[in-house]
Amino acid sequence: MGELLHIILFYSFAAVLLGAALGVILSRNPVHGVMFLVLAFFQSAMLWMLAEAEFLAIVLVLVYVGAVMVLFLFVVMMLDINVESVRKGFARYAPLGVGVALLMAFELAQLIWLRSSGVVGSGSFAETAEGYSNTKALGSVLYTEYVYAFEIAAVILLLAIVAAITLTMRKRPGLKVQDIGKQVSVRSKDRLRVVKMDAESKE
Amino acid sequence: MIEIVTGLWDALPPLVQYLTVVLSKILLVSIAVILTVAFSTYFERKVIGSMQARVGPNRVGPLGLLQPFADVIKLLIKEVVVPTKSNKFLFVIAPLLTLVPALAAWAVIPMNDWFVIADINAGLLYVLALTSLGVYGVILAGWATNSKYAFLGAMRSAAQIVAYEIAMGFALVGVLMAGGSLNLGDIVAAQSGGFSNWFLIPLLPLFLVYWISGVAETNRAPFDVAEGESEIVAGFHVEYSGVAFALFFLAEYANMVLISGLTAIFFLGGWASPFEGIGFLQQWGDIPLIGWIFSGGFPWLFLKIAFFMYTFFWMRATFPRYRYDQIMRLGWKVFIPITIIWIAVEGVMAWMHIGPWSGLTI
């Protein structure tokens, strides 16, 4: 019963995933394409959930769907895409696309062949014990055995952020900026001068 | 009679039994959330009315209590106008995309020590993931409407939500360090033992950051630039009418209740009673109707949520709207550094074995 349900869920998620992936490349409207990509991420998260990798599944949704794709959508929405000019490049880039597709198909076939020949693994995941936490298992390896690789990856990402910000930071002349600290700490005597003078007569 | 019912129940296959239990729990929670939303609109109007020395709704039903239902019926029978040049599919699906995450996040919220729909390990991550999805509805609504005002509202809202989500996530890192778990029930259990054990005290900066970011995430005043009436009419939902508008409204208030509930669970001990640590009060915990005051239970969670909802309305009646660049400055330059510093402080304190977090062992 459970096994059957598992299989049914796997194939339905996989089918929707493939459909969404096709939708990404076939839809003419870029916003629709982004939404199909979101659906594809969701379905892959569901597949990971079926493999009992709940941490990876939720983080996929959190990072890719919740943050990366929002920024994608943000950029794509502001594009005014001219379909005609996009079509023009199609013939030029088609050989490259076909090459990449063939390479990926070859790699996939190799992996399937390797799996079925029984050289590595048995093709299925080991059953996990009751109370097993994917998050804890991942964390205990990530922060002990692979801590250097993890930290180096973090530093590289930080470097990318700093570089991107430095590239876009430029001082424009005549830019008016408020310094909020200054605004808050201003006192009346800095701005206002009270002048004492005698009353003047009309003449 | 009871035997017949239990006999029928046992005759059902286990899958059907399981589905019945889960679906009825879901139905119960959804109806409760929707009713809370309905009455919080009434609550809001009464609170703001009294703060502005007005009466608030008092015509429909006793004390105006039926006003929310009158509003819902009005919205349901209004026509839904779909703008001619809009993207129809996305226009219709956008309100649903805001509402679904707001309701789905309730799946992992523990109401008391035994009632929770899904008691999952990574509950905190699930909540973070789902609250980050609400922004899609707003962005798509703004884009699909094909109107400048809606588009500007969507742009503002997207930038704001992405900015405050980071501060929110970091604040929750502090909570999970103190609680030693990602499971919301375990986080509440780690705060048991009275008011002094609540994370409110050791994590006060994170509490403030989380709560204010929560207000910003729900696009409520004073962070409601996404629908700033004086500049862009009504922001992303300017072209929505009738039921479609009602769904946005429902989602906004459901998100407010959700953020209130999460703040109560993460920092105010959820359903736990503040009197737990006091010895002589414990013997009263078994008194039938008022025992929950001393031993904790769902009413405490409800009271804490009601308090935060009141704060939402209080802020709306009190503060002027933030200017857009000030919102961005607050999110990126104030909140994120505060959370990062406090996580470091917390780590050092736990490492030196100072502080209340016993669950954290280094």
Image: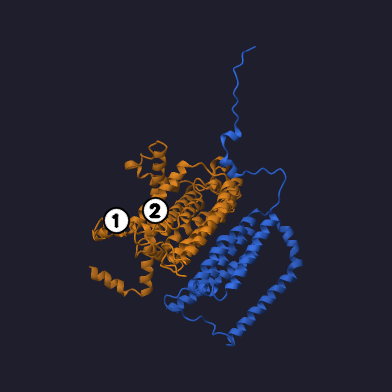
- Please tell me whether residue A99 is drawn above or below residue A75 in the rendered image: below
Type of amino acid at the residue the image marks with label 1: Ile
> Which of the two residues, A151 or B26, is positioned nearer the viewer here?
A151
Type of amino acid at the residue the image marks with label 2: Ile
> Which of the two residues, B119 or B332, is positioned nearer the viewer here?
B332
Q: How is the image coloured?
A: by chain
> Which of the two residues, B105 or B24, is positioned nearer the viewer here?
B105
**Rendering coords of residue B71 (x, y %):** 42, 45
**Rendering coords of residue A144 (x, y %):** 54, 74
Chain colored orange: B
Question: The residue tagged with tag 1: helix, strand or loop?
Answer: helix
Give the number of the mark in front: 1 or 2: 1
Residue B238 appearing in the image: no
What color is chain A drawn in?
blue
Circle 1/circle 2 CB separation < 8 Å: no
Q: Quadrant of residue B23?
A: bottom left
On residue B293, which mark appears?
Answer: 1
